[in-house]
Image (cartoon, rainbow, N blue to C red):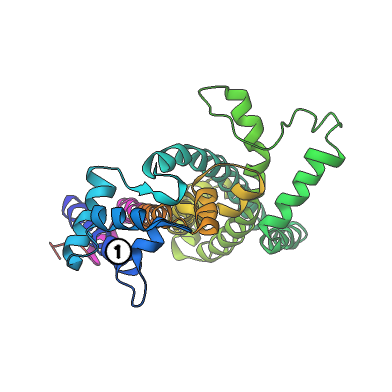
Amino acid sequence: MTRFIVGRLAWTLAVVVAITILTFLIFFAAPGVDPAHQLAGRGATPAAVATIKHDFGLDRSLPVRYALMMKHLVIDRDLTSYSQGRVKVLPQLVDAAPVTFSLVLGATLLWLVAGVLIGVLAASGRRLLDPLLMGAGLIAISIPTFLLGDLLNLITQDRLHGFFLFSWIPPLGYVPFAQSPWGWFSHLVVPWITLSVAYVGIYSRVLRSKLQEVSEADFVRTARAKGLSPRRILVAHTLRNSLLTLVSIFGLDFAGLVAGGALVTEVVFGLPGIGALTFHAFQDLDLPVIMATVIYGAIFVVLANTAVDILYAWLDPRTRSSGFDPAT
């Protein structure tokens, strides 16, 4: 297992370096594009453009440009958004990251619990319950996030805000947990529901399909022949083996959302997270912020994928023999 982890981490480091190089080439070496003017933003003065060229070494070779960009981003952490009046980029990412983590973690808890429960109920063999739950799951998957968010905003913020069920929901925005735990929860509960609905539908349908597949396996038939109760077979055998499938898709889903995939939910509910920061940066053509968020998102996805691979290898030792184990 140790050799597998070391090999996987080495591969992850190589991928991260490749991502930074690719991102650098897109922003600093695209044919016909002057990166100095892009970094300076709209309406930049010649003096500002000259300053940027000096700071980033844009009149030097590509390797030197890449090294300087990494130095500004990783070592000095002073990458500056000139279009915002020389505002540091990384403090914006640091301020936005807890908002996105709070949103995604809460939604994750909801969709995992609800998805597993619905998937188990649907696979329980009851003829009426299965099509009803799977039909509801398909509807949940089909509803666009922005539409569901706007609908919930209309209900909780406008039409029925005076109703006792929704009167406690505050205006759109975000309150840090350290400042007010209740304010943090009350601002995020509706976004949690909005973000989790589609994933509840996906995970319940995937789990139900896997449970039905595993229930026909030889080891499950053997457990039935031994006289084990249906509940014990479900928990100790069928569900345990079926959850391995969810581990794989969960890692990528979670990483994608934290990396900016929750953009629509953040914008709809006025949450100043990574997704909203990226959205506004594209609107303003704020290249330094776009660069930083792209690299941040890509690196987080790679690291999360590595963590999932290691967890999957721990849960299923057969996977260690493929890919990265030098012992094989």
Whole-percent x and y of residue 207? 56, 58
For residue 144, what is the image quadrant?
bottom right
User: Which amino acid lies under the numbered mark 1 shown in the image of this protein?
Assistant: Phe
Q: Which residues are magenta?
A: 303-323
Q: Residues within 10 Å of mark 1 (few under 14, many from 20)?
A: many
Image spot of residue 113 (x, y percent): 58, 44
Q: How many marks?
A: 1
133 vs 198, nearest the viewer: 198
The answer to which of 230 and 165 lies nearer the viewer is: 165
The answer to whether residue 239 is above or below residue 24 is: above
Can see residue 20? yes
Residue 31 painted magenta: no
User: Where does the C terminus fall, quadrant-wise?
Assistant: bottom left
Q: Which residue is mark 1?
A: 24
Compared across the picture, whether 100 is left or right of 94 comes to right
Q: Quadrant of residue 183?
A: top right
Residue 225, given in percent of the width and then of the height, sits at 51, 57
The image shows residue 32 at horizontal and vertical percentages of 36, 77
Residue 308 seen by the camera: no
Image vertical order of residue 29 relative to residue 279, above or below: below
Q: Residue at x 47, y 37 (%)?
A: 98
- Residue at the far left in the pictured view: 327
Question: Magenta stretch: dominant SS?
Answer: helix
Considering only vertical position in the picture, is 46 above or below 160? below
Residue 83 placement, left or right of 268: left
Above or below residue 10? Residue 103 is above
Residue 321 belongs to magenta span: yes
**Residue farthest to the bottom, as pictured:** 31
Asked whether 101 or 86 is in front, the reply is 86
Residue 252 in the figure: left or right of residue 162? left
